């Protein structure tokens, strides 16, 4: 027993879901270590005796994966392999009462804004002097930066406001301080994320100030790329595109989830826009920056999407020729506005529609990539894998977009460095390059 009491706790943080959750895990990791607690992120070590699972509760598949992970570690606890299991994040925020009944073996459940309460379990304090500092869980040359939390939008299908609350912007000065700290520690690319990045500033400054924020971050020495994600299209602030055009270290890249290509479905979704307005916005953006890469996401099978409405979305994709596209199948989420509607499209039909859209996108991506063959691009090297150095151009974000593959037997690249590469070949989702300089 004496030896047991002398054993030092080792914490392992497991992250489910999106990059916004990853940021939360990195903040938690920083706070634990700042309090002198030994902690790691997704460590394979067998001597971690406390597990914290940061869950996702966005759609059915994500919820299932989170629950399975909780059950896996609860079983490990029952076998004596770990001492405590804590659960935090979106699933815990949304279903805390149910989870406490269904999986009582978990030592405590916490919501998305309960970090101080979670730290108290370790007799630790939330250290305000660590705000802006964050231990990264991946190579330091890129970092996600969460510019706001929560969302005020009324989208029919979305449970994020239930899990993350209303929109709260972080002050520009705080974000600049964080960017300076990251740059000093080797970060070259900032990926700006939020539930709704174009709403930035309305709560703090009574007006949209995303363009001002991007300008301020662009001035931080050492930051060579700034990339904008999750820009809501309704009321889109066009001064953001003006700043993108004027600043060379802001990537010509925009992630703007449009969700559908039928005006009637967009109305049912409560998106506050129409297909015509979305097309007009995309054309306006491309008129200002013709070379911009636009990433969007669409939902297949939302209530009210008949064959006619789906065909409208197909036509929309074929007309817009998005550089990047992701398609999700509609998930019927309790307590959302759409939950009161009939979810009458079979899952296999939803999946068929999603697959059909992605087949169209594959051809679009292939055609666009072929136009890059013979051209030179600045490439940020992310990793070495399967005999290739793997990097990205300014038109590609981490994990979701195209990659540039450079033959490691012919060229040497340092991870985290920029190289100039000439594209020699291309497939639907990969570019092959040779180093020029």
Image (cartoon, helix red, strand yellow):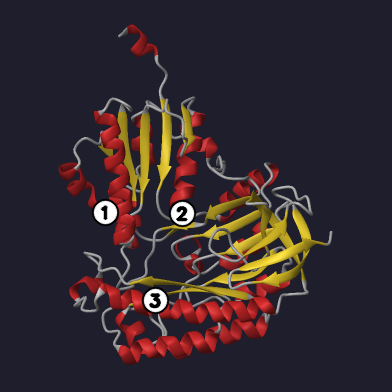
**Labelled pair 2, 1 in contact (Cβ < 8 Å):** no
Q: Secondary structure at mark 3?
A: helix
Q: Can you identify the residue that label 3 sits on?
A: 354
Of residue 167 and residue 296, the one placed in the foreground of this image is 296
Disc on the earlier residue, 2 or 1: 2
Q: Are the two marked residues, 3 and 2, in contact with CB atoms closer than 8 angstroms?
A: no
Near mark 3 (Cα within 10 A), the count class, few <14, some 14-19 or many ≥20, is many
Front position among marks 3 and 2: 3
Foreground of the two, 311 or 289: 311
Q: Give the quarter of the image for residue 185.
A: top right
Q: Is residue 254 left or right of residue 266?
A: right
Q: Is residue 297 left or right of residue 154?
A: right
Q: Is residue 266 above or below residue 38?
A: below
Of all residues, the one furthest to the left in this rendering is 101
| Residue 68 x, y percent position in the rendering | 29, 47
Q: Is residue 204 above or below residue 279?
A: above
Q: Which residue is mark 1?
A: 94
The image shows residue 147 at horizontal and vertical percentages of 52, 57
* Quadrant (top left, top right, bottom left, bottom right) of the N terminus: top left
> Label 2 belongs to which residue?
20
């Amino acid at each position: 027993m004496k030896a047991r009491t002398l054993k030092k706790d080792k914490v392992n943080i497991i992250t489910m879901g999106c990059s916004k959750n990853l940021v939360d895990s990195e903040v938690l990791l920083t706070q634990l270590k700042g309090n002198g607690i030994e902690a790691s992120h997704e460590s394979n070590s067998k001597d971690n005796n406390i597990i914290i699972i940061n869950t996702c509760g966005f759609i059915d598949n994500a919820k299932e994966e989170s629950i399975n992970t909780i059950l896996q570690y609860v079983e490990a606890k029952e076998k004596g392999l770990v001492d405590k299991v804590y659960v935090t994040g979106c699933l815990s925020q949304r279903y805390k009462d149910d989870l406490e009944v269904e999986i009582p073996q978990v030592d405590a459940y916490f919501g998305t804004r309960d970090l101080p309460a979670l730290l108290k379990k370790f007799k630790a304090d939330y250290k305000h002097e660590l705000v802006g500092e964050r231990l990264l869980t991946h190579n330091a040359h890129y970092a996600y930066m969460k510019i706001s939390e929560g969302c005020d939008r009324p989208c029919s299908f979305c449970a994020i406001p239930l899990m993350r609350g209303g929109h709260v912007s972080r002050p520009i000065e705080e974000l600049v301080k964080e960017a300076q700290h990251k740059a000093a520690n080797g970060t070259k690319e900032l990926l700006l994320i939020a539930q709704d990045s174009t709403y930035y500033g309305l709560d703090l400054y009574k007006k949209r100030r995303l363009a001002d924020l991007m300008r301020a971050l662009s001035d931080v020495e050492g930051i060579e790329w700034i990339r904008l994600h999750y820009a809501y299209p309704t009321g889109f602030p066009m001064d953001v595109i003006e700043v993108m055009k004027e600043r060379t270290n802001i990537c010509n890249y925009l992630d703007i989830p449009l969700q559908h290509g039928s005006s009637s479905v967009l109305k049912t979704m409560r998106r506050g826009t129409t297909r015509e307005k979305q097309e007009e916005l995309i054309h306006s953006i491309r008129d200002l920056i013709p070379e911009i890469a636009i990433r969007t996401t669409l939902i297949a099978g939302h209530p009210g999407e008949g064959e006619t409405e789906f065909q409208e979305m197909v036509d929309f994709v074929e007309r817009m020729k998005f550089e990047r596209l992701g398609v999700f199948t509609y998930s019927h989420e309790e307590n959302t506005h759409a939950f009161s509607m009939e979810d009458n499209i079979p899952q296999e039909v939803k999946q068929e529609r999603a697959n059909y859209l992605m087949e169209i996108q594959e051809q679009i991506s292939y055609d666009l990539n072929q136009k890059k063959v013979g051209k030179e691009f600045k490439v940020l090297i992310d990793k070495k894998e399967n005999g290739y150095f793997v990097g990205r151009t300014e038109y590609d974000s981490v994990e979701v977009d195209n990659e540039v593959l450079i033959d490691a037997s012919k060229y040497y690249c340092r991870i985290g460095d920029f190289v100039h590469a000439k594209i020699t070949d291309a497939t639907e989702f990969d570019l092959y390059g040779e180093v020029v300089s």
